[in-house]
Image (cartoon, grey):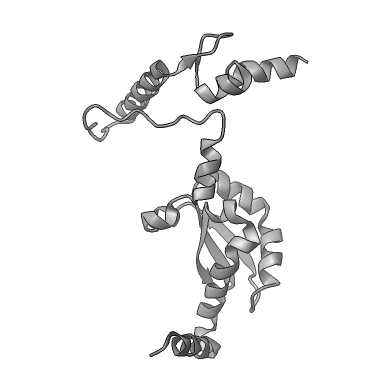
């Protein structure tokens, strides 16, 4: 069966009342990056429609809160492109981690933007030996603190405050971002 015929079959199915919602969801998925922009689309993914409410998985709580404030604008843009109209949008981190890893990966453009930031750390220090899964919150914190301390020892020092500093900040401002911010604030 040629692909054109398959497309026609899908369109015919989606025209039937019981499939209409699925067609609406597919159109939302198709236009989502245009509606919210590529950087937001990399951190979000529509997951389902239930009784006129679009549920969107987000990468973290910050995205959820930010997009909740923007939801009326997003609904307006979506409803201009799809029918029947969406009544509301709910953003949640819960569905984000249920998605396959390859769908959660950042886009290449986002990754390049991160690398060009002066505070970007080239690569986290690889563990010397496998670290056991922490059994308590205190163990988890200690593992995190040990990694941060090892990472800080690898970094250059800010000439003003002697704190560890990413090389990009030194190249850009000749000091760490905190010291340059304090200097700007003093002006």
Locate the C terminus by quadrant: top right
Residue 169: x percent and y percent?
A: 57, 23
Residue 30: x percent and y percent?
A: 55, 69
The reply, left or right, for residue 149 in relation to residue 179 is: left
Location of residue 132 with respect to 86 vertically, above or below: above
Residue shown at the point (44%, 87%) measured from the top left: 6
Location of residue 100 with respect to 28 vertically, above or below: above
Location of residue 63 with respect to 184 vertically, above or below: below
Image label count: 0
Residue shown at the point (63%, 58%) measured from the top left: 36
Residue shown at the point (66%, 74%) measured from the top left: 85
Q: Nearer the viewer, residue 49 or 78?
A: 78
Furthest residue in direction front, as rendered:
171
The reply, left or right, for residue 126 in relation to residue 64 is: left
Based on the displayed image, in which of its 4 quarters is residue 100 positioned? bottom left
Q: Nearer the viewer, residue 57 or 130?
A: 130
The reply, left or right, for residue 2 in relation to residue 23 is: left
Based on the displayed image, in which of its 4 quarters is residue 51 positioned? bottom right
Location of residue 85 with respect to 75 vertically, above or below: below
Residue 167: x percent and y percent?
A: 51, 22
Residue 68: x percent and y percent?
A: 63, 53
Residue shown at the point (38%, 90%) measured from the top left: 1
Based on the displayed image, in which of its 4 quarters is residue 182 positioned? top right
């Amino acid at each position: 069966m040629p692909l054109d015929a398959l497309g026609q079959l899908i369109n015919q199915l989606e025209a039937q009342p019981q499939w209409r919602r699925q067609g609406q969801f597919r159109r939302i998925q198709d236009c989502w990056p245009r509606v919210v922009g590529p950087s937001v689309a990399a951190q979000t993914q529509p997951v389902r429609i239930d009784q006129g409410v679009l549920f969107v998985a987000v990468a973290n709580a910050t995205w959820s809160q930010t997009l909740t404030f923007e939801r009326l604008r997003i609904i307006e843009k979506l409803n201009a492109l799809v029918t029947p109209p969406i009544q509301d949008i709910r953003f949640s981190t819960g569905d984000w981690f249920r998605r396959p890893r390859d769908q959660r990966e950042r886009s290449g453009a986002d990754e390049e933007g991160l690398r060009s930031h002066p505070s970007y750390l080239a690569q986290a220090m690889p563990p010397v030996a496998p670290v056991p899964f922490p059994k308590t919150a205190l163990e988890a914190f200690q593992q995190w603190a040990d990694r941060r301390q090892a990472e800080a020892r690898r970094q250059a020092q800010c000439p003003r405050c002697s704190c560890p500093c990413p090389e990009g900040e030194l190249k850009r401002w000749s000091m760490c971002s905190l010291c340059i911010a304090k200097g700007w604030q003093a002006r």
